[in-house]
Image (tube, rainbow, N blue to C red):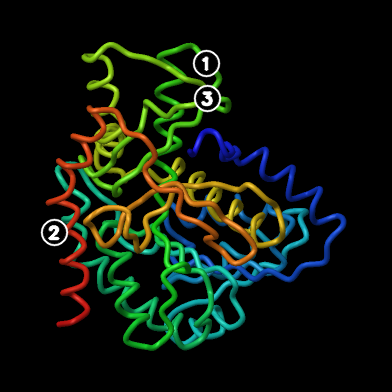
Amino acid sequence: MFSRLARPQTLGALAGALRNFSSTTACNNKVAVLGASGGIGQPLSLLLKNNPVITQLALYDIAHTPGVACDLSHIETGSEVKGFLGDAELGACLDGCEIVVIPAGVPRKPGMTRDDLFNTNASIVRDLVKACTKHCPTAFLLLITNPVNSTVPIASEVCKAAGTYDPNRVIGVTTLDVVRANTFVANLKGLNPADVNVPVVGGHAGKTIIPLISQATPSVEFDPETLDNLTKRIQDAGTEVVNAKAGAGSATLSMAYAGARFTNSLLAALNGKEGVIECGFIKSSETECPYFSTPLLLGKNGIERNLGLGKLSDYETKLVADAMDELKGSIAKGEKFVSQ
């Protein structure tokens, strides 16, 4: 399945491939980052500025974007950077965008779950996506804002109401779960994390995060206790960072890396690179949940094929079953928010 087809590349490997590609191919790719002044948005924008395939990088937030854009514009790469400030400039930011990455919203603090962010972040995502349906209705919408298990359904319902919905263009970025799984497995086995690939399915919160260690590349084995501890660490890794930052924020740098990795993978596929695979939270019929994260084969039209769950171990089958109620509830909460 996933591991037999191709391994998602690290950010550095993707950047090299894109540099080689851009030297021989004319392209015009405008990417917007909504929430570009925040803890995720700034490092994410920095990483995207290094992608030679991006010709225009549009940065939007409710504060500080002119300064962020000015700072990034001094970097010696080809993309043009512009900052857009407040509601009045949102439309201009979005006009002509091929990809819109949305990390906007408030971060978690100690004691908070991702679901605690819902009331604030749901409204932010709703309003930003509504603007996208007007100004870039065919753009790919990459949702980073938590709770992803709810914000992706919110974005989908907003697009449906506007008549612009394409289920292959609304994607929750769960790449950080894969990045963490790769790192934690590599550390336990003394491997280079760049050489490890662990598909992670389900959702993007707590027990809905399901690492498929049995499908890891290279193949690895753990005793039951170690496997259970490893799985729980991957599931609770966001809380690990929140607690370590002691009130100063949540996972921003690693999330920026993961967001840039998915965006760069999508751009590489859209521009002709074959065999690009990333996990993402999308509209799905793979399980009884209407949305589910699985490995996705990306191509010139975005999502070419949902690669599904593959063969699960008994342990992983139970993890999927145990995640269903929570995941369904988060999805329904997002859909209900828009309908009300």
Q: Which residue is mark 2?
A: 329
Quadrant of the rendered image containing residue 330: bottom left
Around disc 3, counting alpha carbons within 10 Å, would you say few (fewer than 14), some (14 to 19), or many (20 or more)? some
- When the figure is inspected, residue 117 is found, relative to residue 64, above or below; the finding is above
Neighbor class of circle 1 (other Cα within 10 Å; few <14, some 14-19, many 20+) is: some
- Label located before the other in sequence (1 or 2): 1
Q: Which residue is mark 3?
A: 193
- Rendering coords of residue 18 (x, y %): 73, 50
Instruction: Say what secondary structure mark 2 lies in.
Output: helix
- The residue nearer to you, when weighing 1 against 153, is 1
| Residue 102 image position (x, y, % from top left) | 43, 64
What mark, if any, has residue 191 been given in the picture? Answer: 1
For label 2, the crowd category at 10 Å Cα-Cα, with few meaning under 14, some 14 to 19 and many 20 or more, is some
**Residue type for callout 1:** Leu
Q: Are marks 2 and 3 in contact (CB under 8 Å)?
A: no
| In front: label 2 or label 3 | 2
Q: Secondary structure at mark 1?
A: loop
The amino acid beneath tag 2 is: Gly
Which amino acid type corresponds to the residue marked 3 in the rendered image? Pro
